[in-house]
Image (cartoon, rainbow, N blue to C red):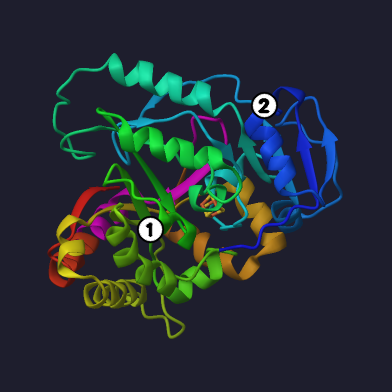
Amino acid sequence: MPDFNPSIILYTADALNDRGRAVLSQFPQAETLEVKQHNRLPELGMNHFKVKSDVLVLGKLKTQDIKWSGRSSDYIAPSLANGCFGACTYCYVDRHKNVNPITLFTNIDENLASIDAHVNSLAWPKPMNQTDATFWTYDIGCNSDISVDYDLTLGIRQVFEFYRDHPKAKATFATKFVNPGMLNFDPKRKIRIRFSLMPAHISKLVDVRTDSIEKRIAAINDFHEAGYEVHVNFSPVIVYSGPDGDKKAWRNDYRELFRQLDASLRPEVRQQLKSEVIFLTHNQRQHQANLAINPKAEELLWVPELQESKVSQFGGWNIRYEHQLKRKMIAVFEDMVRDEIPWCEIRYIF
Ligand code: SF4
């Protein structure tokens, strides 16, 4: 877990409710500065990484939109935060902003009221689907890493309590951090944490400033024991050759990863663990930025001979593996899961 200690906190006036003031008092040494908009920050003279470790922003989320997902969850909840201490080279949250410090939205009561109204408007019992057999699921961490945010505001614990106690709603989020403080909370299986996994030596290059794969795997049993439902998120799957040109290098490394997982998990943890698999998508703008700040990792992500481009819904150029090739890679991945960890159901793969 990062030792996050911002030197400056930017806030909008409407973010200073009890939650916002509590965050300010948690970092009394930080300089504070009021800004007009949480997503239009003044020039801070800090690079990509320093902004993420030195700046915290407090804002109020204006629109409480809840979007259909059908993949990681039934719905995407309104963001609790946006931005992250981590600096993963493929992070889609970083794609759309010049600087991306952790921005906490302090109007958590509004967020939870909108979820409560939304879930109560849905059919009950819920028709069973791959996201969950019983509860309507909400992804609460699409634009930040909730394991990091948990230590910055008691608001995240309030969110955990809401979902734990709600008769119809369940929360879920993917994470690349292990926060031992979260083990003191028992969500009674109403929060699904999804640890993101990939071959460890690749993670070291691309999952910048996150916890190691070894740490994440080692945490799975503990989180289950604490009362979380634990799944894994094989994402992004990056296809690469070995230093000797071996085109199967990525496959061999995933087999090894599956074996590590198989050896680490207790039987009752395996029994409830499912996975989701998402092959890498990349982005032209991010590619240019990475060439300047992380060219070694970029060699793994930008492989035009394997990739095709597509205009994203936001208008930028996204890059993904060529679709015929990807079909084959998906089949390979499914076969490897069947061979090595047959107890691990794939909820979805694309
Ligand atoms: S941990 Fe997640 S949110 Fe943070 S930089 Fe990495 S991909 Fe982005």
Mark 1 nearby-residue class (10 Å; few <14, some 14–19, many ≥20): many
Residue drawn at x 40%, y 25% as measured from the top left = 67
Residue drawn at x 45%, y 25% as measured from the top left = 112
Instruction: Confirm whether the magenta stretch covers residue 311.
Output: yes
Residue drawn at x 55%, y 19% as measured from the top left = 63
Residue 86 placement (x, y as % from top left): 59, 57
Instruction: Confirm whether the magenta stretch covers residue 169.
Output: no
> Which amino acid lies under the numbered mark 2 shown in the image of this protein?
Asn
Mark 2 nearby-residue class (10 Å; few <14, some 14–19, many ≥20): few
Residue 142 seen by the camera: no
> Which amino acid lies under the numbered mark 1 shown in the image of this protein?
Phe
* Residue labelled with disc 1: 195
Query: Regarding mark 2 in the picture, which secondary structure is present there?
Result: loop
Quarter of image, res 255: bottom left
Residue 330 seen by the camera: yes
Vertical side of 339 occupied by 317: above or below: above
Tell me where the magenta segment starts and ends, as one range. 310-331
Q: Is residue 344 left or right of residue 114?
A: left
Q: Is residue 257 left or right of residue 180?
A: left
Vertical side of 151 occupied by 82: above or below: above
Q: Are marks 1 and 2 in contact (CB under 8 Å)?
A: no
Residue 8 placement (x, y as % from top left): 81, 47
* Residue labelled with disc 2: 17
